[in-house]
Image (tube, rainbow, N blue to C red):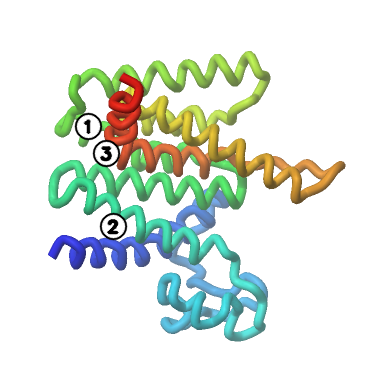
Amino acid sequence: MTWLWAAMFFIYGLVFGSFFNVVGLRVPKGESIVRPPSHCPNCGRRLTAADLVPFFSFVFLKGKCRGCGSKIQWVYPVMELLTGISFALSFLRFGFSGELIVALLFMSLLVIITVSDLAYMLIPDKFLLLFGVPLAVLRVALPLDPWWDSVAAAIVLPGVLLVTAIVSKGGMGGGDIKLYVAIGIVLGTVDSFLSLFFAALLGAVFGIIHLRRQGKGRRTPIPFGPWIALGAAIAYLYGDAIVGSYVNLFF
């Protein structure tokens, strides 16, 4: 029964992921998330219900618009799939509990800021406020142990990153730093620093591969928000297990 519910949450995640794509791509440009209806950005053809089945439409259409044959951006199916996976893993980790609500809201925030940062290298404050406020309220109702850990993480880690950005003269964007306020509220100090470690490691690996593929003389900036999101998701879902395994291995 547990896996059946996980499958249901995966399907819910696919559906919400499709909506999160729209939010992440339109809101930073000041556009409505309702109008115009979903359409091909190349030919303007309005998409039908058959074109809008999350993830599966991309597969059945072989990644191309039904009307003009132009390629569909990979971000759509990937983020839908990742949202489905994150929702399913959240259920498997927390079950039907109050923390599951925190997890679903948190994963939703991470997906939306990833879409926005990939498209525009921007994490709008409105996303952080929209999700940060309810996450803070939920953390009051569902506190970490100790209760002040969320407060400490929301202050200390962004402060460290802000100082680092000032010293390095812009090594990290303001949106990334403010995102860590929300991450700190949800994860607490240990898992927040763990998330930063994962983000830096994964981002560095991708950055090296990206630079090698670009070749000499070509340097395009790489958004760090997606790696922060991935690192935060890993630390949130599996931080306790990772830290526990490390402690048992070396101590």
Q: Residues within 10 Å of mark 2 (few under 14, many from 20)?
A: many
**Spatial separation of the CA atoms under disc 3 and disc 2:** 21 Å
Q: Is residue 91 above or below residue 248?
A: below
C-alpha separation, residue under disc 2 versus residue under disc 1: 22 Å
Q: Residues within 10 Å of mark 1 (few under 14, many from 20)?
A: some
In front: 119, or 229? Answer: 229
Amino acid marked by disc 3: Pro
Instruction: Check disc 1 and report its element: helix, strand or loop.
Output: helix
207 up-or-down from 195: above or below: below
* Of 72 and 174, the residue lying toward us: 72
Q: Which residue is mark 3?
A: 134
Note whether residue 186 is visible: no
Tell me the CA gap for discs 1 and 3.
Answer: 9 Å
Percent from the top left, x then y, of residue 147? 19, 21
Image coordinates of residue 60 in percent, x first then y, are 50, 82
Q: Give the labeled residue for mark 2.
A: 88
> Image check: 98 left or right of 152?
left
Q: Report the disc number at residue 95.
A: none
Give the residue displayed 30% in from the left and 63% down from the top: 10
Q: Earlier in the sequence, mark 1 or mark 3?
A: 3
Answer above or below: position of 35 versus 29. below
Disc 3 is placed on an element classified as helix
Q: Is residue 99 left or right of residue 217?
A: left
Label count reads 3
Of label 2 and label 1, which has the lower sequence position?
Answer: 2
Q: What x and y, as percent, mark residue 72?
A: 60, 71
Image mark for residue 139: 1
Q: Under tag 2, what secondary structure?
A: helix
Quadrant where the N terminus sits is bottom left
Query: Residue shown at 45%/22% (left/top)?
Result: 158
Q: Does residue 184 appear in this view?
A: yes
To which quarter of the image does residue 85 belong?
Answer: bottom left
